[in-house]
């Protein structure tokens, strides 16, 4: 991921609460699509990269089970 931001800076930039952002990062909740898009944009990344889609696809191709 491109930019180095604190959790607070990222939450402010995305327009969500710090508490809400922390729940996403901790894996307690999954952000709505619009929020995920804003987070990815703020990090100069993609939604797929945020959710580890490429890594999951590699594991699936190898026949590994999801975690």
Image (cartoon, rainbow, N blue to C red):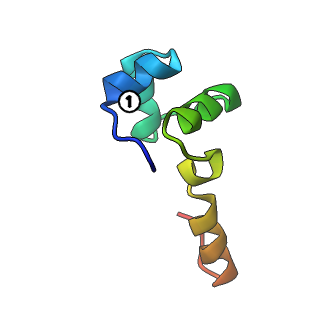
> In front: 64, or 40?
40
Instruction: Please tell me in which quadrant of the rendered image residue 23 appears.
Output: top left
Residue 58 spot, x, y in % from top left: 62, 75
Residue at the extreme bottom of the image, as rendered = 62
Q: Is residue 40 above or below residue 16?
A: below
Q: Is residue 53 above or below residue 19?
A: below
Viewer can see residue 50: yes
Mark 1, secondary structure of its residue: helix
Instruction: Please tell me in which quadrant of the rendered image residue 52 appears.
Output: bottom right
Q: How many marks?
A: 1
Q: Is residue 8 above or below residue 63?
A: above
Label 1: how many Cα within 10 Å (few below 14, some 14–19, many 20+): some
Residue 1 spot, x, y in % from top left: 45, 50
Viewer can see residue 30: no
Residue 46 spot, x, y in % from top left: 61, 47
Residue located 65% across and 83% down the image? 63
Residue located 57% across and 39% down the image? 40
Residue 42 spot, x, y in % from top left: 51, 32
- Which residue is disc 1 drawn over? 22
Residue located 34% across and 34% down the image? 5
Q: Is residue 11 above or below residue 33?
A: above
> In front: 28, or 13?
13
Residue located 37% across and 19% down the image? 18
Specify whether 38 is left or right of 9. Answer: right
> In front: 3, or 58?
3
Instruction: Please tell me in which quadrant of the rendered image residue 54 appears.
Output: bottom right
């Amino acid at each position: 991921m491109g930019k180095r931001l604190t959790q607070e800076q990222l939450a402010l930039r995305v327009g969500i609460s710090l508490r809400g952002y922390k729940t996403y990062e901790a894996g307690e909740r999954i952000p709505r699509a619009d929020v995920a898009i804003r987070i990815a944009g703020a990090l100069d990344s993609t939604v797929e990269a945020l959710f580890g889609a490429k890594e999951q696809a590699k594991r699936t191709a190898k026949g590994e089970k999801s975690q």
